[in-house]
């Protein structure tokens, strides 16, 4: 065969397609740039010369050859020849000849990848744009994984064979400080299951309309609700709103109340399984029988008896809607209120919330065609006010108040909810000492029997006492008196309540602030021997020398009870006789903010403080008896403060619960400031308005307090071993407003130095029996003597006398009632604004406390009118 007819050799790397590409690449006007023609030595094989003599690198396949051809013939072809590395130009038709782009290296490789990302056949931003195959593959993989996980979870999580411990009947057990059992109480005595046929149709529909309209149609879970709950949980928020009725039934019956993702997933899977095993009626029956309705009532039968005194089967539609509203949170929807747990849960606020949700539920039932027009109109016209609270077994006398105080402490110092707590299983060891609790109750009953006769005197009705006793340097509450007892319908804990102004028992905080911070005129602490004007009806000065003005821009006058002309007297004397005017001006000179800070560091809660106006110095604030005893314990402990506590340990089913260590002790004020306050209050007992406390027969310090119109009277006193406060007041049982005690016990008026001091003395005698008289630390001289503006210049060497005499002898029969009324509370204005001071009815109050000695009677200072209008409970809750 002739040479020119011989078949040319095939390229080593591509077969026919490669041959075609080679032919097309050599045709005129259509050159295909072979792979590797980039001008680098590595672009050719087996040759040292650039662009010739070597064998071309084979292509990887058809696709690559096609892409190479497209690059060489596309709209962006480059005609110019590339310069060679040594300055030489490549010959036409060579790998680097015309038709090849400038040095672009292909983005793909010979090896095929499982996931083509970034995409090998794309350039620029297109390389990072995933293909539809990749997106669809990932989606299928993701959802497939979810299905697999859900399947595994569904298979692994089974429905528990038994109810969890929280769903069973259990009690909480409280113990005295010595470990002896105080009382066992809880859900064990207030739980009874009923079948669905004993639950009114209206009750069933009320719950469904309010909480889960799709109950009869859904699978038992709400995926969107679960997603919301999980998102909230991840943010640390509330998971409320993520459960169907089936899920809530599962949670109540089989699971804990912990807000965790693990528990939420278990709840979901168990709910799905429960939905396949139980009928909807069985699930609804279980939910209504395990739900918490407040007042310790678990299940619809217990709730019907607790709130309406009837069986569940006899509930009316309007009553069913009321009970359904409680499921949102009985603490906030029970009209009886629950201020011991939350200051916003007042009876008035709770009733308003309850009425609103009750009406909404009835409306939803009507809209869902579960309540006819006639039945809806009948129900909506009659809000079914439930009956009042009742004492449960063992919660009579003071036990109910002790358990209430301990429960409140537990809930405020742990993650335990009220619902969990009331399900039972807790063992609570308290700080209460049985002998002291009984002694305090006995002291109150003795004085009540001796002085009060409500059957014969109308003004003796509705008189109440509240008291508390705290250990200094420790904070343990060893005793309290909360009232007449749950069995007598008295459910407010008077030892830890709000709305009762403390009167002149506040003055020691003003003096302490002066001795610690001084006044705007002093260079340092102020001595208690500094003199201030004690006369009646005085103008009060601001720091710039101007007078405090009322809203009508006329001067504000501070009143005392009597018009006795005390003249300029030392602060020690003013404390002894509880004269108002010196302490109001002193408070202005020191700064009411400093007074407030000293009181807060001593143990008074922020929520109980009244408005910072001039009357603030006279006790318009409303701390509780517990907090006042604890604050005075700071004086007894030479300035060391320990927050009051009532629980030393908590166990749940035998396991210790964390968070119940003793409160940390802090130095609230300089030691000598506290000791000088104690020295001044010792003088009150020895020579002043607290003389009735001398009957204790041992060293003691204390202060009396009486508020405007004798609406409340206090005595707070202490030794080194115990600090005890006693409050006495009258209260309208319907409106909770404080009533005047003028005429109570057959006396013209009641003062802190009288009945409250007698109760204090009776109790302290018994509580300290057999204990040594420790006295108090010696107080060292403190501060500089700097008299009020206008007072005579201080003498170089003033003498200290236990009880001072005044330059002018008092009138033979000083007035025990206020002089002409001064401005109303709304007119109390000036440096701190023109706001109502929380109940002052005679301007800044008319003040002082009656001394049992021949000294002038100085009583009746500024106070509040309505119990419950203040805040500041022992544990940061609502009580004052």
Image (cartoon, rainbow, N blue to C red):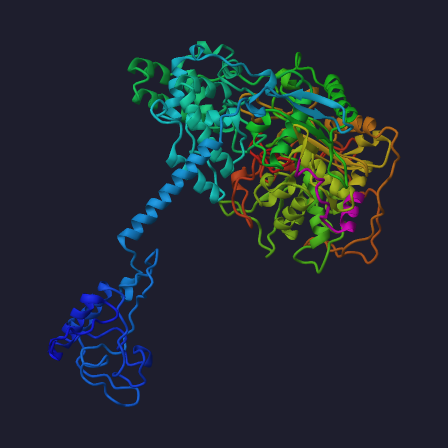
Q: Is residue 592 above or below residue 474?
A: below
Q: Is residue 677 magenta?
A: yes
Q: Examine the image and state in which quarter residue 147 appears.
A: top left
Residue 513: % across, % down: 69, 49
Q: Nearer the viewer, residue 509 or 138?
A: 138
Residue 255 falls left or right of residue 123: right
Residue 74: % across, % down: 16, 71
At horizontal 28% and vertical 90% (from top left) the residue drawn is 87
Q: Is residue 425 above or below residue 571?
A: above
Q: Nearer the viewer, residue 200 or 319?
A: 200
Residue 265 falls left or right of residue 537: left
Quarter of the picture containing the C terminus is top right
Q: Is residue 81 visible?
A: yes
Q: Nearer the viewer, residue 626 or 152?
A: 152
Quarter of the picture containing the N terminus is bottom left
Residue 200: % across, % down: 41, 12
Q: Is residue 72 above or below residue 324?
A: below
At horizontal 66% and vertical 38% (from top left) the residue drawn is 658
Q: Is residue 55 above or below residue 209?
A: below
Residue that extends furthest to the bottom in the rendered view of this protein: 87
Q: Examine the image and state in which quarter residue 343 appears.
A: top right
Residues rendered magenta in the picture: 657-680
Q: Is residue 808 visible?
A: no
How many labels were placed on the picture? 0
Q: Examine the image and state in which quarter residue 272 appears.
A: top left
Residue 852: % across, % down: 78, 30
């Amino acid at each position: 065969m002739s040479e020119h007819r011989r078949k040319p050799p095939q390229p080593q790397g591509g077969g026919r397609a490669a041959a075609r590409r080679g032919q097309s690449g050599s045709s005129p006007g259509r050159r295909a740039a072979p792979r590797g023609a980039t001008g680098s030595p590595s672009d050719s094989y087996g040759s040292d010369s650039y662009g010739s003599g070597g064998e071309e690198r084979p292509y990887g396949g058809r696709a690559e050859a096609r892409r190479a051809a497209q690059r060489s013939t596309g709209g962006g072809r480059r005609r110019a020849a590339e310069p060679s590395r040594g300055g030489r130009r490549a010959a036409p038709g060579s790998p680097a000849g015309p038709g090849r782009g400038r040095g672009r290296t292909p983005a793909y490789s010979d090896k095929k990848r499982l996931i083509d990302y970034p995409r090998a056949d794309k350039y620029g931003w297109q390389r990072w744009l995933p293909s539809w195959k990749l997106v669809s593959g990932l989606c299928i993989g993701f959802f497939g994984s979810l299905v697999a996980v859900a399947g595994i979870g569904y298979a692994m999580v089974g429905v528990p064979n038994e109810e969890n411990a929280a769903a069973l009947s259990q009690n909480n057990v409280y113990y005295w400080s010595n470990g002896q059992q105080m009382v066992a109480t809880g859900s064990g005595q207030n739980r009874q299951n009923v079948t669905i046929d004993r639950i009114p149709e209206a009750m069933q529909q009320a719950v469904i309309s309010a909480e889960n309209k799709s109950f009869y149609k859904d699978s038992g879970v709400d995926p969107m609700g679960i997603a919301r709950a999980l998102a909230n949980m991840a943010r640390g928020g509330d998971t409320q709103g993520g459960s169907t009725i089936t899920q809530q039934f599962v949670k109540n019956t089989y699971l804990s109340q912990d807000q965790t993702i693990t528990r939420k997933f278990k709840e979901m899977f168990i709910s799905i399984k429960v939905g396949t095993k139980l009928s909807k009626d069985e699930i609804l029956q279980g939910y209504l029988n395990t739900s918490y309705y407040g007042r310790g009532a678990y299940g619809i039968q217990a709730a019907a008896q607790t709130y309406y005194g009837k069986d569940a089967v006899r509930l009316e539609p309007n009553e069913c809607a009321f009970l359904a509203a409680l499921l949102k949170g009985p603490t906030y929807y029970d009209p009886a209120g629950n201020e011991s747990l939350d200051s916003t849960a007042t009876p008035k606020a709770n009733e308003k919330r309850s009425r609103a949700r009750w009406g909404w539920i009835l409306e939803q039932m009507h809209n869902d065609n579960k309540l006819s027009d006639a039945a809806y109109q009948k129900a909506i016209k009659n809000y079914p006010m439930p009956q009042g609270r009742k004492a449960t077994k063992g919660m009579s006398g003071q036990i109910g108040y002790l358990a209430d105080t301990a429960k409140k402490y537990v809930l405020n110092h742990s993650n335990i909810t009220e619902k969990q707590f009331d399900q039972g299983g807790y063992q609570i060891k308290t700080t209460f000492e049985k002998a002291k609790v009984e002694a305090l109750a006995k002291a109150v009953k003795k004085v009540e029997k001796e002085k009060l006769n409500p059957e014969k005197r109308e003004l003796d009705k509705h008189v109440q006492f509240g008291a508390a006793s705290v250990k200094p340097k420790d904070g343990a509450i060893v005793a309290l008196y909360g009232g007449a007892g749950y069995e007598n319908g008295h459910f407010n804990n008077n030892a830890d309540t709000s709305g009762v102004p403390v009167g002149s028992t506040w003055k020691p905080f003003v003096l302490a602030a002066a001795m610690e911070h001084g006044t705007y005129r002093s260079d340092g602490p102020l001595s208690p021997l500094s003199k201030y004007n004690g006369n009646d009806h005085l103008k009060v000065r601001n720091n710039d020398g101007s007078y405090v003005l009322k809203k009508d821009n006329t001067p504000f006058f501070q009143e005392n009870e009597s018009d006795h002309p005390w003249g300029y007297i030392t602060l020690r004397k003013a404390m002894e006789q509880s004269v108002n005017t010196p302490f109001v001006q002193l408070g202005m000179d020191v700064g009411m903010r400093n007074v407030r800070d000293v009181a807060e560091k001593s143990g008074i809660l922020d929520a109980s403080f009244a408005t910072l106006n001039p009357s603030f110095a006279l006790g318009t604030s409303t701390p509780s008896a517990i907090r006042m005893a604890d604050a005075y314990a700071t004086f007894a402990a030479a300035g060391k403060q320990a927050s009051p506590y009532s629980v030393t340990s908590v166990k749940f089913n035998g396991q210790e619960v964390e968070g119940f260590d003793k409160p940390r002790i802090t130095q609230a004020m300089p030691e000598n400031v506290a000791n000088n306050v104690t020295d001044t209050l010792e003088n009150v007992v020895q020579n002043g308005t607290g003389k009735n406390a001398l009957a204790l027969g041992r060293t003691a310090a204390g202060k009396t307090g009486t508020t405007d119109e004798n609406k409340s009277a206090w005595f707070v006193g202490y030794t080194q071993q115990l600090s005890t406060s006693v409050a006495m007041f009258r209260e309208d049982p319907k409106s909770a407003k404080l009533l005047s005690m003028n005429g109570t016990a057959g006396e013209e008026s009641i003062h802190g130095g009288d009945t409250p001091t007698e109760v204090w003395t009776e109790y302290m005698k018994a509580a300290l029996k057999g204990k040594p008289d420790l006295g108090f630390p010696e107080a060292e001289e403190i501060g500089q003597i700097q008299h009020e503006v206008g007072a005579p210049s201080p003498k170089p060497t003033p003498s200290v006398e236990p009880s001072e005499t005044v330059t002018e002898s008092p009138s033979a029969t000083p007035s025990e009632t206020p002089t002409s009324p001064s401005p109303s509370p709304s007119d109390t204005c000036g440096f701190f604004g023109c706001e109502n001071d929380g109940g002052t009815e005679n301007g800044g109050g008319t003040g002082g406390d009656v001394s049992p000695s021949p000294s002038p009677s100085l009583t009746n200072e500024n106070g509040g009118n309505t119990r419950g209008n203040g805040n500041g409970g022992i544990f940061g809750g609502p009580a004052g």
